[in-house]
Image (spheres, coloured by chain):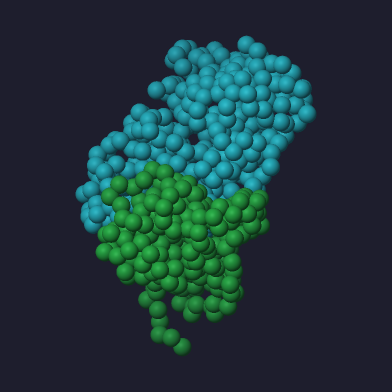
Chain colours: A cyan, B green
């Protein structure tokens, strides 16, 4: 059996998968990946089922060492510099660590969370069908807490399968779409207008339970206490100080503040990736549009395997070079007509 | 047959959940309708519904928008909400032991002072109550009970505590609660129980269900300590006294 030993890792990194829905009626929140598309993309590259447990790597860097044999991995989500034994690894590709080699990940650029999927998954004891960490509930395996240096992730020996890349839709920084409710009637029309007309930032005091927003104060019509009702990922609750908190996958299952709007499910992962301090906007859409987008998103998840492309070692290097160049807006070697077209989104670069 | 019941409000909670609201307030009749709809949806599963979460005044229905849309699910919910509540044959009753006051219930004396009575009288009123699990929420096993005597209604604390002990039995507003895990609370702490409403590696992991009936019985600190050891080893401690 091979394993990945964590030589170093920053805070806000944990094992996550598709989560454990089904027990919210008992106060147990599903948890699971902040960005489900990135988790599914990494797992698809690694030859796993899309919601297999992977390492959700927070905004800071990390180092992993293969022991006991080779380990095949894949990276997706927030772009960051990555290398194995000095050779660059591009985002949205798979790669293999020989026994004893180190995978080094830099800081996230232009996002918050990357997903490190491991071919064959991570050995652990599922609770309610999931290895996802929910530290408050004492759940998660192999460690029921965020990852630390010295932790070991047991996995299967690398299969030797050819490395692949995955072509994902270009990342957009369009406004985050919401549907109004469930308690938008607790706010005046001008407050709702203020909400969609303003620029917002995610506060640095945010975590997997909730993202605090910085922007204009949203006043309540009838006070800020409501009788607790159920919450979902993306509930935009407005506490007494008028500064909204967006509830994230480790949220409480119920809450007693009015919820003015809800982030649509297709945009939730994109919202979770917005780095603290970057300005963004919200846009209200109809329920019909939100549901069309949810179905498109489900179709994208379902068809990820069709987006896999073979990768030659020379392409790997060009892609890695391109990826590294994005950070500096340098001219990319791939402009010359190789397979990886440079999109505007790629060139948007880091914050 | 009963007259037509007032329909609940269908409030969108994003594109994958509907908040089915029976009342804006803490309202026993509304909570009964929440639990009745929850049972109806369990008895007659609707394709696409993934999970239901009862709260005091609303039922949160999670669904997969690939399988059913908001309009169609809403119509189905409104139809099911007209059903009379299924007979409560499966309702269970639990007796939960509590050590009141002292280090286990640091607010008991202040509550007695505020309500112009003695700590013993507060305990007597609390154990006399016949409660129902109105909802379980916020953190695993945190059980909100309805049925608190009017003479124990008190506003919540001005300054919520950031950390209250596991097993805390408390009162807040018109509610009383059984808290399983240590965590923040703005309620008044009357006592502590060894009962774990949530415990991994025990069958069942969750002891209480929304709709269960609960009564409390007072025990001394020595009994609590013994029960706490037994509960840690996986015993229920709470007695099921009827079903």
Q: Quadrant of the C terminus of chain A?
A: top left
Say which quadrant the N terminus of chain A sits in: top right
For the image, the number of numbered tags is 0
Can residue B17 be seen from the camera position used here? no
- Which residue in the rendered view is the most extreme toward the bottom? B1
> Residue B132: x percent and y percent?
47, 69
Residue B5 visible (yes or no): yes
Residue drawn 51% across the image and 62% down it: B219
Residue A93 appears in which quarter of the rendering? top right
**Residue at 36% over, 57% down:** B108
Return the x and y of residue B209 as percentages of the image width and height.
Answer: 54, 64
Q: Position of residue B119 (x, y in %)?
A: 36, 61
Residue drawn at (38%, 59%), measured in percent from left and top? Answer: B171
Frontmost residue, A95 versus A244: A244
Left or right: residue A158 compared with residue B128: right
- Position of residue A75 relative to residue B99, above or below, is above
Closer to us: A133 or A350:
A133
Does residue A25 lie above or below A140 as drawn? below
Q: Say left or right for B230 vs A228.
A: right
The front one of B97 and B31 is: B97
């Amino acid at each position: 059996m091979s394993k990945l030993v964590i030589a170093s890792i920053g805070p806000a990194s944990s094992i996550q998968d598709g989560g454990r829905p089904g027990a919210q009626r008992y106060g147990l929140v599903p948890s699971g990946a902040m960005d489900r598309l990135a988790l599914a993309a990494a797992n698809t590259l690694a030859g796993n089922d899309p919601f297999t447990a992977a390492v959700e790597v927070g905004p800071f860097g990390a180092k992993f060492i293969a022991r006991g044999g080779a380990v095949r991995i894949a990276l997706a989500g927030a772009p960051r510099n990555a290398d194995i034994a000095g050779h660059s690894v591009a985002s949205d590709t798979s790669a293999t660590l020989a026994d004893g080699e180190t995978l080094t990940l830099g800081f996230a650029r232009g996002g918050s969370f990357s997903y490190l999927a491991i071919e064959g998954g991570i050995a652990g004891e599922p609770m309610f069908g999931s290895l996802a960490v929910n530290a408050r509930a004492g759940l998660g395996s192999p460690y029921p807490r965020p990852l630390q240096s010295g932790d070991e992730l047991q996995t299967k020996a690398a299969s030797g399968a050819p490395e692949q890349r995955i072509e994902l839709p270009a990342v957009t920084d369009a406004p985050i779409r919401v549907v109004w409710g469930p308690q938008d009637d607790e706010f005046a029309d001008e407050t709702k207008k203020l909400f969609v007309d303003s620029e917002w930032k995610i506060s640095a005091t945010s975590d997997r339970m909730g993202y605090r927003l910085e922007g204009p104060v949203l006043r309540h019509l009838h006070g800020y206490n409501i009788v607790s009702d159920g919450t979902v990922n993306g509930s935009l609750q407005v506490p007494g100080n008028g500064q909204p908190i967006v509830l994230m996958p480790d949220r409480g299952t119920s809450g007693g503040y009015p919820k003015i709007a809800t982030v649509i499910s297709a945009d939730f992962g994109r919202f979770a990736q917005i780095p603290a301090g970057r300005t963004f906007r919200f846009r209200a859409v109809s329920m019909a549009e939100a549901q069309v987008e949810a179905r498109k998103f489900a179709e994208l998840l379902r068809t990820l395997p069709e987006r896999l492309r073979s990768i030659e070692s020379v392409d790997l290097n060009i892609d890695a070079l391109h990826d590294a160049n994005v950070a500096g807006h340098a001219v990319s070697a791939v402009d010359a007509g190789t397979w990886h077209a440079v999109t505007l989104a790629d060139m948007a670069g880091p914050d | 047959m009963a007259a037509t019941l007032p329909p609940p409000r269908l409030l969108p909670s994003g594109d994958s959940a509907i908040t089915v609201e029976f009342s804006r307030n803490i309202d026993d009749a509304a909570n009964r309708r929440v639990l009745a709809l929850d049972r109806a949806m369990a008895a007659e599963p609707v394709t696409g519904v993934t999970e239901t979460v009862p709260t005091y005044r609303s039922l949160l229905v999670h669904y997969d928008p690939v399988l059913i849309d908001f309009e169609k699910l809403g119509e189905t919910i409104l139809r099911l909400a007209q059903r009379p509540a299924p007979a409560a044959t499966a309702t269970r009753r639990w007796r939960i032991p509590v050590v009141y006051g002292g280090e286990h219930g640091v607010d008991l004396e202040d509550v007695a002072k505020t309500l112009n009575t003695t700590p013993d009288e507060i305990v007597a009123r609390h154990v006399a109550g016949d409660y129902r699990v109105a909802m379980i929420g916020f953190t695993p096993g945190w059980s909100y009970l309805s049925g608190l005597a009017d003479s124990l209604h008190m506003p919540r604390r001005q300054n919520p505590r950031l950390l209250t002990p596991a097993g805390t039995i408390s009162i807040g507003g018109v509610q009383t609660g059984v808290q399983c895990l240590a965590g923040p609370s703005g309620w008044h702490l009357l006592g502590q129980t060894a009962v774990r409403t949530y415990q991994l590696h025990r069958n069942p992991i969750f002891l209480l269900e929304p709709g269960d009936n609960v009564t409390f019985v007072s025990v001394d600190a020595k009994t609590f300590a013994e029960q706490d050891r037994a509960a840690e080893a996986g015993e229920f401690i709470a007695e099921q006294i009827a079903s």
